[in-house]
Image (cartoon, helix red, strand yellow):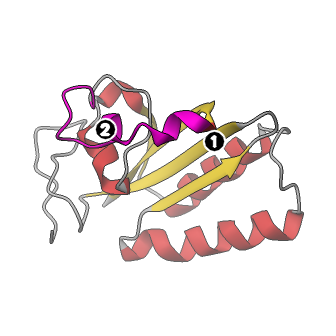
Amino acid sequence: MHWHAYKWNGNGADRANEAERRPNSPDFPTSPLPPMRTGDWLAKPASRIAATFHKVEDAVEWLAAESKAHPELICQARAYWEDRLAIAREALPLGVDVQWGEWLKGGRFLSLGLICCPNRHVLHPCPTTSHAAVGTP
């Protein structure tokens, strides 16, 4: 198993455009919006992948670095972020996607996702290989 990292930062109100966030929409592949289901990130073009990790600690370090890179996050409590990172560290090796959504000052929204590949909830192929990501729908 490996994990693909995805990131979106945009106007929080744009998330209400649910049609573009569903893989059956013709706009889904080109829409910058995060999908409604976490595993559907794998149906986006490979160019949307921010990074790919084969070690849990590397993936968790990416989450930590990305959250620190946004001083405009509304919640800056250190304990909050440490707890979230600990949960991610436990969840990822179990095949559980980690998807964070955080409000930023000014009505913007930050979405950070680490998506398990293969994924147990969707049958999308790995976006970086021709191998199918087989899971249990």
Mark 2 highlights which residue? 19
Packing grade of label 1 (10 A; few <14, some 14-19, many >=20) is many
Badge nearest the viewer, 1 or 2: 2
* 72 relative to 28 in the view: left or right: right
Q: Residue flagged by tag 2: what amino acid is it?
A: Ala
Above or below residue 74? Residue 1 is: below
Q: Residue at x 43, y 27 (%)?
A: 32
Instruction: Using the numbered discs, state the Cα–Cα distance from disc 1 to disc 2 in whole angstroms.
Output: 19 Å
Q: Are there few (<14), some (14-19), or many (20+) residues within 10 Å of tag 2? A: some
Q: Position of residue 82 (x, y in %)?
A: 77, 68
Query: In front: 92, or 107?
Result: 107
The quarter of the picture where residue 8 lies is: top right
Would residue 99 be found to the left or right of residue 21 on screen? right
Q: Helix, strand, or loop for circle 2?
A: helix
| Rendered location of residue 75, percent (x, y) | 83, 56
User: Which mark is first along the chain, 2 or 1?
Assistant: 2
Which of the two residues, 136 or 55, is positioned nearer the viewer here?
A: 136
Q: Which residues are magenta?
A: 13-28
Q: Amino acid at mark 1?
A: Leu
Rendered position, 116 above or below 111:
below
Residue drawn at x 35%, y 40% as measured from the top left: 21
Q: Which residue is mark 1?
A: 110
Q: Secondary structure at mark 1?
A: strand
Q: Position of residue 135 (x, y in %)?
A: 16, 66
